[in-house]
Amino acid sequence: MIARTSTALDANSFSPSPLLAELLKLRRSQPLLVVIGLPLVVTGTGIINTLFSGRGLEDGWNTLWLRTVGFYGLFPLVLGVAILASLVWRPEHRDSNWNTLMTSPIGATHIALIKTLAIAGLAAAMQATMLIVVVATGKVLFGLPGLPPAHLLASGTLVAVACVPLAAFQSSISMLTRSFAGAVALAAALAGVSVSLLTAKIGSISYTLPHALATRTALLGSGMFSAPSHPDMTTFGGIATTAVILTLLIVVSTGWILKHRDLHI
């Protein structure tokens, strides 16, 4: 068993080089296929549904948002983050890379933090792609006036924040198992649980389960599953605060596990 000897954060470990190293490891994993491809597929599905429904966009941007970002928040968002987490941890499960990681001078908690930041950064890029594609679709394909309402753009931006604890959670799962499919399947199951809880209007659970928090945030402004149609600053602040607390708890817990357990599976 190879254990971490310290969780202390090295003074030099806060340089950007560890995070950059994580991103460089992903060159062969092609995360851009997820970051760019998933938003394109989801938006394309929304376009097809709109064209074949024969009803058009009855409520302009609100309808387009519901059929794209709303659908994206139900399952694809969580699955996308899970896939990205598996891609970030995949290099560590190859050959002797795990031993190299475990004997590095960087503390266990800092490793967990760097992995989370790498995943969260990719998730934020995926969300930005989603927003850009939706706005471009509305303007170019459907000729909608102006831009989406401010509360929708604010909600869409907040999704990137709500995805950070989800990134931390899926990072921990992908650390614990080599199974790519297993980590993604667990995310799908928890996404299903989240949707069921939101459907049952148990919104408070979204403040304890990262998957539900991300889904609930993505649905803000849609009116789906009791999500407020016009969220206010109190809602935004509550989600941001919850995201910070959940992320800290998960990262610290992941660091503790990384220090004390032999994680070769």
Image: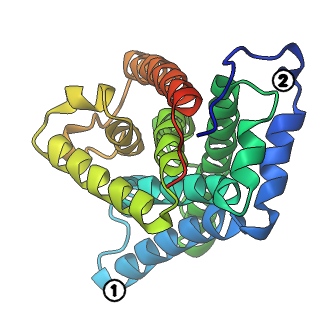
Drawn side of residue 104 relative to residue 136, left or right = right
Query: In which quarter of the view is residue 223 placed?
Result: top left
Q: Is residue 76 visible?
A: no
Q: SS of the residue at dot 1?
A: helix
Residue 181 in percent (x, y) is at 44, 68
Q: CA distance from mark 2 to mark 1?
A: 54 Å
In which quarter of the view is residue 58 placed? bottom left
- 176 relative to 66, above or below: above
Q: Position of residue 90 (x, y in %)?
A: 64, 59
Q: Residues within 10 Å of mark 2 (few under 14, many from 20)?
A: some
The one of 24 and 160 positioned closer to us in this rendering: 24
With 6 as the anchor, is 216 left or right in this view? Answer: left
Quarter containing the N terminus:
top right
SS category of the residue bearing label 2: helix
Name the N-terminal-most of marks 2 and 1.
2
Residue 68 image label: none
Whether residue 71 appears in this view of the structure is yes
In the displayed structure, 175 sits above or below 19; it is: below
Q: Nearer the viewer, residue 216 or 83?
A: 83
**Closer-to-camera residue (243/28):** 28
- The residue sitting at 29% across, 32% down in the picture is 206
Instruction: Name the residue at 40% across, 18% down.
Output: 238
Q: Residue at x 39, y 15 (%)?
A: 234
Instruction: Identify which amino acid the numbered label 1 is placed on.
Output: Phe
Circle number at residue 13:
2
Q: Nearer the viewer, residue 212 or 87?
A: 87
Q: Which residue is mark 1?
A: 52
Measured along the vertical axis of the image, is residue 20 above or below residue 239?
Answer: below
- Judged from this view, the residue extending furthest toward the front is 1
Looking at the rendered structure, the kind of residue marked 2 is: Ser
User: Between tags 2 and 1, which lies in front?
Assistant: 2
Give residue 259's quadrant in the image: top right
